[in-house]
Every structure is written in C-alpha cells, then in structure tokens.
Amino acid sequence: MTALRILHLIAGRQWRGGEQQVVRLAGGLAARGACHQAVMTARDGPLHQRLDRHELTVHPVAWSMGLDPRTLLSLVRGMSGFTVIHAHDAHALRLIQWATTLTHKAPSIVATRRVMFPIRHPQLWNSVAKPIAVSAAVRHTMVAAGIAETDVTVIPPAIDLANASAPAAPSLHTLLELPRSTPLLVVAAAMTPEKGHRIAVIAADLMQKAGSPAHWAFLGGGPEQRPVAKMVRARGLASKVHLLGWRDDAPRLVGDATLMVVPSLSEGFGSVVLEGMGHGVPVLASETGGLPEALSEGGGVLVRPGDPGKLAEMALALLSNPAHLDALGQAGRKAVVRFDLQRVVDAHLGVYRSLFVSLPQANHVGVP
C-alpha cells in the first residue's frame, strides 16, 4: 500500500483556534507514528514558531497575503511525494487547487472548514475529496452551498487531556491584583467583530449598575481592541474590565476564571470552551453556531446571541448560585472527554485512510 504522506497547508500568520488545532493534530499524528507529515506555513509566523517548539516537520514559506504567489510557487515545488494535502483554511484550498492545475498532479485533497460564514466560492470544493466541518452547524452552511451532506465529515476541535494545562502561576487574580474572592469573568477570543466583545462590555456595565463586584478579563488581540478599549473608558469600566491583549498563557489563565463567557455572534464551534471545560470552569455562551454542540452534554448554559441584557442577567444568576456553578464545572470536566485529542486524531486518520480505498478515483481533482 502507498505510504500515507500528509502535507498540512495553513497560512499561520496569526495564532487563533485553527492554528492551535493544527499543532495539536500534527503533534497527535506524530506521537501515533501512523504517517509521514509536514506543515507548510508562513515563515516566522506564530504557527511556525510553535511548530518548531514541538519538533514537528515544517516547510516555512513566504506568505504575507492570503493568495501569495510565492506560496503557490513553493507549493508547486514542495507538494511532490505527498499523497494527501490537507487545507486548513480557504486560501490554502485555493492555492492547492491552482497548484494541482499547474502541475497536473492530483494528490487527494482534504479540507477543514471552521467558520459559519457562507461559502463565497462553492466551486472551490469541487477539488476536495474529503471535506471536514468542525460542527454540524458548519456542515449545514456547506450543504447550503451545494456540498452533499453525506460527503462532509464532522470532526470537532480537540483538547489534549493527557497534557492539559495546569492553572497558570501566577493566577489571573494575582496578575490583576484582585482578592481570590472576587468573581472573575473571562472572555478568551481574538478581538474581531463576530466574537461579541462589545456585547460583553455592555453586559459588564449592566452588572456594575446592578451592584455586582465582578471583574472581567479579555484575553485576546485584534482589530476590535482599540474600539472596545474606548468603549470601556466611555462607560467608566476601566477598573472592572481588563483588556490584557493576546497572551501565550491564555489557556492556563482561563483556569482561574469564575465563569468563562463566550458572547459570540457567530461561531463555527468555539474551541475555547474546551479549555474552560477542561479546567472545570463553567461556561456562559451564545446559542449560535457550534456552541450548543460544544455544550450539549453539559458544562455551561446558553443565552440568545447579541443580547447584553440576557447575558448580564444570566451571569448574575449564576454568580449568585455557587452550587450551580460548581455542578456546571464538574459536568464540563466529564463532558469534555469526548473531545480528547486521541479521538480527534483517530477521526482524521480514518478520513486519510479512506482515501486509499480506491486511490486513483480519490485522487482525481475536478477543475471548475
């Protein structure tokens, strides 16, 4: 049988949930020793740096914009010898399609979609042998674009429970110079419009007006950071809402939260909730996208997205009931087991190996 040789392709110019999942998947596959693999990503980007730390094979390339022609050239030169190319974002998929057209080579293409946004170019997926969605909600958007539901495999994000991060030292309370008794709500997400940080600020304002002693910590950076900071100051919340920017230790800092808040307006899955659940931190999340799936077996509660009043009301109710908070945290620890890295690695291996059932047909690339 042809050896399973996988090339992962992802820009990796930022460090978000998708990039973290690539590191976990590649690391899990490497530990299993079931295939030869490499990751092609932007040179000196945050993903490249973290892959190096994990001693994973990486092919760094020039990649400064989504459809960088230098990346295409590197892919044309470097794709030879790989039986499977796994695209981890839309730009990667487009580049693979162009490279296969230019070289007349047809490795099997796997592509993962992690976002809820409508697919703008459905024809891109004509080249995909095995489409993967991170949630049933994402699969629904793919089906709406014309992809057969039976063709799409749902594989959720992973958490490495065997190496789960211990709570950070110093703790988030210590970093913020807060007494341990202070309720602390944490939003850990890139600061982009769909993540709902502005909704969280309004909720924090409502809670403060209701006399709540709770503090909020936002862990993440992005284009919304400056306008959100301005909003915090305008509402007189600077002493209660702490914008800490992006931190490498965010997954461990989450473990010190009283409540994890995910106020997203759109969310493919919301892999950050797995970090909270793994630490036994209860989750308060928007009922949108894949978040209901993430919490379907316990660990948190859902509220209507885009409604700061409901978010504040539920947060106050949870904080006033420590026994309920504790029960949610314990339920989360149990529920998160189904997202363990080993299960997710097994699911990906199943997809990769299925391509060898009839290799010539699976390798065919349709060019729209």
Image: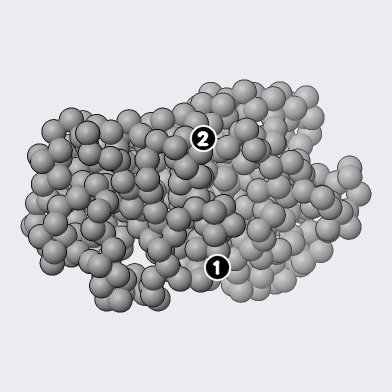
Residue extending farthest right: 179
Question: 10 Å neighbourhood of mark 2: few (<14), some, or many (≥20)?
Answer: many
Residue 223: percent from the left, percent from the top? 53, 71
Q: Is residue 221 left or right of residue 180?
A: left
Q: Nearer the viewer, mark 2 or mark 1?
A: 2
Q: Nearer the viewer, residue 190 or 358?
A: 358
Residue under the image location 45 percent in, 63 percent down? 12
Mark 2 or mark 1: whose residue is earlier in sequence: 1
Q: Is residue 57 above or below residue 24?
A: below
Question: How much space separates mark 2 and mark 1, taking CA atoms?
Answer: 28 Å
Question: 10 Å neighbourhood of mark 1: few (<14), some, or many (≥20)?
Answer: some
Is residue 328 something that shows in the picture?
Answer: no
Is disc 2 placed on a helix, strand or loop? helix
Quadrant placement of the N terminus: top left
Q: Is residue 275 above or below residue 221?
A: above
Q: Quadrant of residue 132 in the image?
A: top left
Disc assigned to residue 341: 2
Tag 2: amino acid:
Leu
Residue 110: percent from the left, percent from the top? 27, 46
Residue 77: percent from the left, percent from the top? 25, 67
Q: Is residue 213 above or below residue 362?
A: below
Residue under the image location 76 percent in, 37 percent down? 319
Is disc 1 placed on a helix, strand or loop? loop
What residue sits right under mark 1 in the picture? 222
